[in-house]
Image: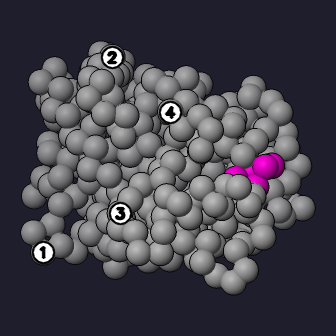
Amino acid sequence: MEFLRNGLVLLMVFMILQRGEGQLVENFYSNTCPSVESIVRQAVSTKFSQTFVTIPATLRLFFHDCFVEGCDASVMISSPNGDAEKDAKDNLSLAGDGFDTVIKAKQAVEQQCPGVVSCADILALAARDVVVLVGGPSWEVELGRRDGLISQASRVTGNLPEPEFDLVQLNTMFARNNLSQFDMIALSGAHTVGFSHCDRFSDRLYSSPVDPTLDPNYAQQLMEACPRDVDPSIAINMDPETPQTFDNVYYQNLVNGKGLFTSDQVLFTDSASQPTVNDFASSPGNFNGAFITAMRKLGRVGVKTGNEGEIRLDCTRFNS
């Protein structure tokens, strides 16, 4: 019986390792680059002092990276042919400040620990650090990712959530990445510091009638900021109340009909997700705890470890 029990334990461990999970550890670089976290934190802080866009841009970059090919910094690759992951239509709106944050942090780390720390790990650390800089929670980041060897624009389509998604579509996409509905709602809270462009939600304003789930006063504000002929690149805060603070006001906005995307507002209008929104809206602590758990789970998606991938010397180019 003991033999059988031990065999099952070994089988479960093997299955976890095969899924690419469970291989990341905190303090992965304790011997090879013990100061990596402070180096990245300083680089992120310096970039933040130059522009607030550092915050939502870096957080969004991490999400977009992990959902395509896994958390392997494949989104960082620049291609002379314009066919890398970052060149896909869904990634063209990624702000350059997010890329620059990771590049600057990588350069600083390379000066101290050449060829040791992956761009994927630096992005994961930077995503945590930007949240902390604007009042959000901190957490221990699991490390040990290696950088991916594939970055193709053609692999992006269908792997990132769209602003018009309903709850089923959101849950389906997140489930493919081992993230639950609860995780999805928590990660959506990153929109508390995000921004978007008029063309991503204008259909809610100029259909007939105006999307009834929108608060009328909020809809009017959006129309004034985004008239029909406005430059589609005009940026609008996702959180109209506290756009530069990482807090639970995003969920309070949903309760009040002030979700910018359909995929935001549906979290409150759908009865299956409404209780979680209400909980996060009333309890900052519950939201922060759920966000930490979800970010750690997100950071395990499709990771390359051990002999997989590489440690890129330049985040924008494969070593070979």
Q: Is residue 283 visible from the viewing direction of this image?
A: yes
Residue at left 39%, top 50%? 61
Q: Distance between the residues labelled 1 and 3?
A: 24 Å
Q: How far apart are marks 3 and 4 (CA)?
A: 20 Å
Amino acid carrying label 2: it is Ser
Where does residue 93 sit, x and y in percent of width and height? 36, 61
The crowd level at tag 2 (other Cα within 10 Å; few <14, some 14-19, many 20+) is few
Q: Nearer the viewer, mark 1 or mark 4?
A: 4
Residue stretch in magenta: 254-260
* Frontmost residue, 196 versus 19: 196
* Frontmost residue, 4 versus 242: 242
* Frontmost residue, 169 versus 31: 169
* Image quarter (top left, top right, bottom left or bottom right) of the C terminus: bottom left
The crowd level at tag 4 (other Cα within 10 Å; few <14, some 14-19, many 20+) is some
* Dot placed on the residue nearer the N-terminal end, 4 or 2: 2
- What residue is pinned by disc 4? 244
- What residue is pinned by disc 1? 81
Asked if 158 appears above or below 297 in the picture, the reply is below
Quick check: is 290 in the magenta stretch? no
- What residue is pinned by disc 2? 38
